[in-house]
Image (cartoon, coloured by chain):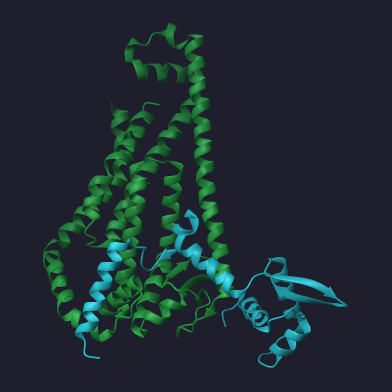
């Protein structure tokens, strides 16, 4: 459990896995098989995700059908892009484990690793 | 007013002259926490002196405009300043213009500082939220309510932390592929140390100062040094938690994108890294105390600096 906000992640991943447009009822039926959850909680969370721009919806009869506004891959790619070379400010506030290196430095390190691993009997 | 000018002078001198010796003192990364404290002490000293100078200036201006005109004239021209000069319309006009320009400049600086910090905060929060929704939760053995650890699909080995509530540690799937469990532990310990040490906050504040006062070496160079020293602080924590070989292996693996087997590094830690470590450590033992005392004395001097300048000026 990751506490608050965790449900948004769970539901987004379910919507992505679903493939096509999905209703609150369909998602609720699936989620209910694995956890204790109220229908209204699922509805509110999906409404929030719609408000934040993660989900688009069209009315169908009485209910809404929800579709993701972008694929999981698109979001991942955007995050990685932001993390690696994104706008100056984001770059500065994300503290990277290793800073970006120039070609020479990383080639030097690669060489060290190659020699270390070659010496080891596998 | 008599105090304002020397205090401004002190702030300017320190902001331009301190970076070179500070960089030399803290560059070897002997005790990164002490080094970090020394840079922050210098920045605080400069800001305190400048703020005090500004306060004296404003108090003098409020106390009496005529008095201010006289004092400004005297402090610039000394006793050569005659009544006919500082009571002339031209002089008052110039003085008023300077005051208005100074106030405008201060407002612009404050606005730039606020905007820079604000924008960084907004982008960070948004980035963290997207990462928490898109990423798969990584079970790290210590579930924390305040830190989420997530994995994002990505071809480059990347690991970083995003400040927020909750804070988020992000790893790319490629990073998980090249790290063994011990190395992963070292990476997580490193990122957690950043979060626990509030390093992002320090860096955001200094970055804001650098944006507000571009070209001031203490903030510009200070930003680089504080960033580097905070990495070393986090490395020290990670090395204590997970061991040096795991941390070194993690650094190599993340930097090159190649798997670095623990056995390979075992060989290295016996040979190259141990010898390098010994070379680096032997002189350090003897110098540690002296180094600590020297930096502590420097910090006391920086703390007292503005007060001493003000005292000396008020006696003069």
Q: Please identify the residue farthest to the right as the structure is shown.
A: A61
The image quarter in which residue B285 lies = bottom left
Mark yes or no: residue B62 visible. Answer: no
Q: Is residue A113 left or right of residue A73?
A: left
Q: Quadrant of the C terminus of chain B?
A: top left
Image coords of residue A106 (percent x, y): 30, 67
Q: Residue at x 37, y 72 (%)?
A: B190
Q: Quadrant of the N terminus of chain B?
A: top left
Q: Residue at x 25, y 68 (%)?
A: A108
Image coords of residue B267 (percent x, y): 19, 83
**Is B74 in front, or is B287?**
B287
Q: Is residue B32 above or below residue B190?
A: above
Q: Is residue B157 above or below residue B138?
A: above
Q: Is residue A22 above or below residue B41?
A: below
Q: Is residue B75 above or below residue B37?
A: above
Q: Is residue B155 left or right of residue A111?
A: right
The image quarter in which residue A30 lies = bottom right
Image coords of residue A31 (percent x, y): 69, 88
Image coords of residue A55 (percent x, y): 70, 71
Q: Please identify the residue farthest to the bottom as the structure is shown.
A: A33
* Total residue callouts: 0
**Is B88 in front, or is B152?**
B152
**Is A105 in front, or is B81?**
A105
Q: Please identify the residue farthest to the top as the structure is shown.
A: B84
Query: Among the chains, which one is green?
Result: B
Q: Colour of chain A?
A: cyan
Mark yes or no: residue B204 visible. Answer: yes
């Amino acid at each position: 459990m990751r506490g608050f906000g965790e449900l948004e992640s769970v539901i987004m991943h379910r919507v992505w896995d679903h493939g096509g447009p999905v209703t609150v009822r369909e998602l609720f039926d699936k989620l209910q098989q694995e956890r204790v959850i109220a229908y209204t909680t699922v509805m509110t969370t999906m409404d929030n995700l719609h408000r934040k721009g993660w989900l688009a919806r069209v009315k169908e009869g009485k209910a809404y059908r929800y579709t993701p506004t972008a694929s999981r891959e698109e979001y991942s790619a955007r995050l990685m892009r932001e993390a690696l070379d994104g706008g100056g400010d984001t770059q500065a506030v994300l503290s990277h484990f290793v800073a970006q290196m120039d070609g020479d430095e990383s080639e030097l390190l690669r060489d060290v690793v190659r020699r270390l691993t070659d010496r080891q009997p596998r | 007013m008599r105090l304002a000018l020397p205090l401004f002078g002190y702030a300017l001198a320190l902001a331009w002259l301190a970076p070179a010796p500070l960089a030399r003192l803290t560059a070897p990364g002997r005790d990164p926490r002490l080094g970090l404290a020394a840079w922050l002490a210098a920045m605080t000293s400069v800001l305190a002196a400048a703020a005090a100078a500004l306060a004296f200036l404003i108090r003098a201006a409020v106390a009496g405009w005529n008095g201010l005109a006289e004092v400004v004239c005297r402090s610039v021209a000394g006793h050569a300043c005659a009544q006919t000069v500082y009571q002339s319309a031209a002089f008052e006009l110039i003085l008023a213009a300077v005051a208005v320009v100074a106030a405008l400049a201060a407002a612009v600086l404050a606005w730039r500082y606020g905007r820079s910090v604000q924008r960084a905060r907004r982008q960070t929060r948004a980035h963290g939220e997207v990462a928490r929704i898109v990423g798969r939760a990584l079970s790290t053995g210590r579930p924390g309510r305040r830190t989420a650890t997530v994995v994002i699909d990505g071809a480059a080995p990347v690991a970083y932390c995003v400040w927020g509530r909750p804070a988020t540690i992000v790893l790319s799937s490629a990073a998980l592929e090249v790290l063994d469990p011990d190395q992963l532990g070292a990476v997580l310990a490193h990122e957690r140390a950043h979060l626990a040490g509030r390093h992002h906050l320090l860096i955001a504040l200094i970055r804001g100062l650098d944006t507000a006062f571009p070209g001031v070496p203490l903030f510009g160079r200070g930003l680089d040094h504080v960033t580097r020293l905070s990495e070393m602080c986090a490395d020290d924590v990670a090395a204590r938690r997970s061991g040096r070989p795991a941390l070194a292996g993690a650094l190599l693996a993340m930097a090159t994108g190649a798997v670095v087997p623990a056995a390979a590094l075992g060989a290295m830690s016996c040979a190259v890294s141990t010898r390098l470590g010994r070379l680096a450590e032997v002189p350090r033992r003897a110098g540690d105390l002296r180094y600590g005392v020297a930096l502590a004395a420097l910090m006391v001097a920086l703390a007292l600096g503005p007060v001493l300048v003000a005292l000396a000026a008020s006696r003069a």
